[in-house]
Structures are given as C-alpha cells and as structure tokens.
Image (cartoon, rainbow, N blue to C red):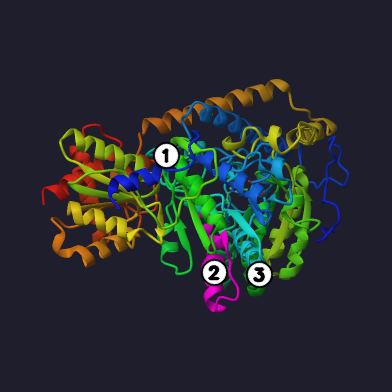
Amino acid sequence: MIQPFTSDPLRWVSEDGQPIRELPARFTPELLRELHRQMVRAREFDKKLVTLLRQGRTTFYAQASGMEATQVGLAHSLRVGHDWVWPYYRDHTLGLAMGVSMLDIVSQCLGTNSDLCRGRQMPHHFGVADKRFVSISSSIASQVPPAAGTAMAQKYLGTDEITVCTFGDGATSEGDWHAGLNMAGASGAPCLFVCENNQWAISTHLREQTASETIHIKAKAYGMPGYYVDGNDIVAVMEVMGHVAERVRAGEGPALVECLTYRIGSHSNADADAEKHYRTREEVAEWEARDPITRVERLLEHLGAPIDPQEIRDLVAATHREVDEAVLTAEATGQPGWEIMFEDVYGDKPVHLELQEDFLRAEQGTATTGGRA
Amino acid sequence: MTATQKLAQAGAGAEETRTLTLIQAVTEAMREELARDERVVVFGEDVGARGGVFLATAGLQAEFGKTRVFDTPLSEASIVGAAVGMAVRGMRPIAEIQFADYMGPGFDQIISQAAKIRYRSGGQFTAPMVIRTPSGGGVKGGHHHSQSPESYFAHTPGLKVVMPSTPYDAKGLLKAAVRGEDPVIYFEPKRLYRAAKGEVPTGDYTVEIGKGAVRREGRDLTIIGYGGVMPDAERAAAALAAEGVEAEVIDLRSLVPWDRELVLESVSRTGRAVLVSEAPRMANFMGEVAYVIQEELFDQLLSPVVQVAGFDIPYPYVQDKIYLPGPNRIAAACVQALNY
Ligand SMILES: Cc1ncc(C[n+]2csc(CCOP(=O)(O)OP(=O)(O)O)c2C)c(N)n1
C-alpha cells in the first residue's frame, strides 16, 4: 500500500485537516495531541533561540520552523537510543522530539561548561551519545558516507539497529551524498536516508539545485526504493517512515525518503533578508497556509477532540519558561577555560601539544588583559 | 630597491583614490574584470541573487545577468571542476567556495585537475582560473568556519596562493589573478572584510603576484606575515616602537610564489625574523620561509627564527580569540628574538 516512486507526495491528511485515507488506528486523539505538543514546543524553541541570538548570547542559529512534522514524525519512527542518527545542522526539532534535553541543546548553543561537546563547535551543532545522535557537522553531506559505514557496521555486527541519516535538498548535490548512497546500496546496509526537502539551500532553489523532478527518484540509481512524502503531514511522515524503517530493519537494504516541506524562517541569522533577496513574501505565505501544526489542530477538530486554545497558550508559556531556565542553568556553569583547547585533539596528548599548552599557560599567567593575547 | 622605494611601490597606482573596505575592493575587482573581459564569469553557491553569504558578489548578477554571474548546485567538486573545464576551453572563471573550510569536497579537483593540467599535458592545456574563498578565524565560527588551509595548497605545485590584507592589494591581486595564466587560490581573510579599510585607486591597476610589501620600516628585526594577522603585526610593531624597538613589517601578500628577495634583504639587515600566521604550526607554510632564511642567512642571524602560529588543534569556538596570535603574542615573540 505504501509505494515508492510515486509522482505525488504520499499524504494522509489534507491541508485543511481532513483525513483523505483511512486514519490508522494508532493515531488516537491522545497521540495526535502529544505530537502537536512536541511540534509547538519546537516552534517556540525556535522563536526563543532567535531572540537569544538577537541578544548576542549566541552567534548562530538555523530555524526549523515549518519543518516540525518531518522532524517530530521521524523521531517517532525510530527507536531512540537504539537506532543511530547522523543528523544535519537543522535537526534540533528532531533532537527535542527524541528527548534531547533543552539544557543540552542550549548549552551547546552557548558553549558553556554544561555543553556535552565542550564548547568546541559553533552553536547549534550538538551531539548526544546516549541518544546515539552523532555530533552535527557543518560540512554539507559529509555525514552521509559515515552513516553508510555505521549501517555497514550494524549489519556486520548482526545488530537489529538501523542508521538514520538526514540532510537538506542542497546536500544531494554533493559528491559525498552520491558516494554514501552508492556505498549503502552496494553493501545492502540498513540505512534510512531522509531528505528534509525544504526547497531552498540558502538562496538556491531546488530548481537551480538539480534538474531532477524530485529528490527521491535519485534512489533508483543506487538500487534502493525512494519514497515521496508530504513532510507537513505528520501522519504521512510516520506511516511512511514506520513502513520503510521496518523494511530496512528486515534486511532489505537502504531506502531514501524525501519529505517535501518548507523552511518558513531565514536560512540562518546571516540571511534575515531572505524575502528581500531571493524569495517572495507570497511564497512564504503560501507555505504558512500549509502549516503542519495547524493541520493537526484541524484534524483534532475533525475528530471531535479540539485542543483548547488556553492549553496552547499554557504550553507556549511553559516552553518559554523552559528555555529561560535552560539558559540560566547553562550560563551558570560558566565557559570552558583555555586548557580544554588541548584536550580531545587526540586520544593521548602528543608532546607538541604539551609544549603549546605550556606556552599558553605561561602567556595566560602573565597576561594583564586576559582574553585576547 | 630600498625599503622606502618598496613602500612607495606598495602604495603606488593611479592618482585618484577613495576609501573602500576589503570586501568592497574584492567586489570592485570582479565588477571591473567582468566588464573588461567577456570570458570572465563568476559563480558559486548563493553568489547570484543573494550576492554571496558575505555579499562579495552583491549586485553583480543584476548588472551582468545570469549567464555571467550565477548560482551553482551545492557541490564544491562541481564548482572547481567546472571552472577547470571552462578555463581549458578559454574562459576566465572566478569560482567562489563559500568558506575555505569547504574546499574539502573540491580538494581533489583542485589538486588533481587544476594544479596539474598544464604539466601533465606538456603545456597543451591550461587552467587559468581563480578560486576565491573567505578564510581564517576571529568570527566565532568554530572549526568549520574558521580554518586557514593555505598550507595544503602551497604544498601543491601548479597552484598560486594569494592572501591580501588591504583593500588596495585585494583589488590589485584579484585582477592580476584573473588575468594570469595559472590557477590561483585567492584567500580572503574574512575578519578583515569590513575591518580593513583603505585607499583604492579608481583607475585600473594590478598587484603582481609574488611580491611582498613593506608595511613599516625598521632596523632591529623583521616581522613577516600575511592575511588576517597583518593588522595585529603592525600593532605589535607600534607597541615595540614605543619601547624604542624598530621592527620592520613585511606582508607577503602571496605565498606561492613568495617574495624571497624581499624577505632575505630585510632579514639580512635586521638579523632577526619573527614569522606570523594563524594556521596551525605543524607543517605551516611559514616553516618554508624559516627554512630558506636559515639556509641563506645562517651566519647573519643574530637569533633563531621565531614562529608565531596557531595551535595544533581544530579551531575552537569558545576560545576563538585566545587561539589567534594577537599583538601581545607577536610582540612577546619579538622580545624573545631580541633577548636571545
Ligand atoms: C561543504 C559545504 N559547502 C557549503 C556550505 C555552506 N552552506 C551551509 S548551509 C548551506 C545550504 C544547505 O542547504 P540544504 O542542504 O538544502 O539544507 P537546508 O539548510 O535547506 O536545511 C550551505 C551552502 C557548507 N556548510 N558545507
């Protein structure tokens, strides 16, 4: 029933919240409310972090507003802490829905001592080992071949885990992307590739990115099925991901799922002028009308279990408090000192690094101004 | 040539000038080269409507159209490889890699194709092209937006490697790179994009690739650097001057080829050299400069060559400023050389 290579994105719920296929029994009002809660929480997190950025308390942030159904839906389709995830930099909504704490994400964004990644990376590039959520890399598509390798190891080791690898539409142009899919295909590794197609790579539209009609059809070249999903329909995302993940888990080899969605906000803080330079206000408005959160609210109304607006207001307020608390808690841990620059470069510390550390210790010990040498 | 003459030369050009930032000078060089020669095209990720993430190409697509200035798919291998192919066919491509940190995916095309096509074809095929890319730290970018990979490219025969530190040089060197016969890796120190301001002639001029510039004259020691560290090297020299030490400051401006003559002439006078770059110390390009100084001037040196470099660690986020060799660290290295 769930077919690869469809010409239209698979969809269960129409844009105005009506089921257009039979709603699978697991989508009870309770589950839908929970999914809605997680999507709203992620949306509000975005807003708060943008504020934090404007306050100069962090230096980079890439919003995922508009992509909640894709990321929350994906989180609910994998076994958290069991399956492995090689994510990309726009995946905090996926992280949050997988149970990564706000403190962990916020700490990474602030580079505090509470940052599991120890203030090494630029903001918004977290990684959490107990969730098997591998530290995010900025370098586009560089996570794809390693994801194939993790899946090859899972096959070799005979585990029942799978690997999930996410990326944007732009990433599919990189050589690494093709190399990774080919490797996974050739080795039959249990890798679930997920394209979060938000249609823009900074200012480059999908139509300038590739002459392919869609992304998912590229799967054909690598000997795996490609699925096309309405990424703003959380029911569709979960149904397809669930089906495909089972297939991958059953040893039928890798698969690619393309979730068609949209990033409502700017690419990052660096292009707040998106609507002025490369896309139109009308286009954004058109996609705002397909908001994945509103769609679930309409569906719940249709099912006769509407969410009380007060409940949403409370959730928004609670989320804002949660972020504020995480920020305060993180900031209270302070920032790592210079000494940790020399740790984790290698498994052991070679002598040239010890010499450089000695040098900096002497310099910092005598520095009158502190900070900049 | 005396240092005074060299100073004059470094600032020479057409009479009329106005103040530009380094990034404005880069844009202007491209605009003028696009206008001058139809074979010139500018392309890369987001360089079109958006004008590049740092806005180096802002306005160029509107002015020259989409066939001359265009966005590409997100693939550095394609960008560099396509530039090689165009250059072989007689065009003069200027390709942008959005951050030097992302030269990785294009690395094979740079070292296997761009750098070697002339040699392996016995000079029958050549790739005159420019790869522009913002590099260096100081912008709180963490390791994927702050690296200084110039040494990888300096190590590869067939490539010219350029890194300006002033608007004047940025424009003149970029024009020279576009008009030259070789593939040029043109690094733009991103923390100076708007911080470096200076006089730039309105008229056409080029700065020869391979010539350094004396930024300050001095007799007691020679500070040699390039790119983003230059303003700090000059600050260090100014601080030393207040203590009665006259440091000569040389900006290499290009690494391949580099100005051996200028460096050796200066160090033979001062007897002391302090080499400054922000790239990690291990196998740093400045190691080559140090080697040549000791080879040529061993018996004239009054102290060992001192190197101020980045640490051998991935560029850190939180300690962004401590990582960089600032004026105090450079001045301390000079004092070390003087007190030997
Ligand atoms: C190898 C590499 N090249 C360029 C960049 C700069 N860059 C950062 S994000 C981005 C666009 C990515 O678009 P896409 O893959 O569609 O993901 P999206 O941001 O739309 O979610 C680019 C070009 C990079 N990070 N890595």
Disc on res. A182? 3
Q: Which residue is mark 1?
A: A111
> Do tag 2 and tag 3 residues touch (Cβ < 8 Å)?
no
What's the residue type where badge 3 is placed?
Asn
Instruction: Give neighbour class at mark 2: few <14, some 14-19, many 20+ (Cα, 10 Å).
Output: some
Q: Is residue B167 magenta?
A: no
What's the residue type where badge 1 is placed?
Gly
Secondary structure, mark 2, is helix
x then y, percent, for residue A98? 58, 45
**Nearer-N-terminus badge (2/1):** 1
| Image quadrant where residue B307 sits | bottom left
Secondary structure, mark 3, is helix
Q: Which residue is mark 2?
A: A153
Chain ID, mark 3: A
Give the magenta-colored segment's residue range. Answer: B101-129
**Nearer-N-terminus badge (2/3):** 2
Chain ID, mark 1: A
Q: Is B246 left, or right, of A170 in this rendering?
A: left
Q: Is A141 left, or right, of A2 in this rendering?
A: left
Chain ID, mark 2: A
Instruction: Give neighbour class at mark 3: few <14, some 14-19, many 20+ (Cα, 10 Å).
Output: many
Q: Residue at x 33, y 50 (%)?
A: B225
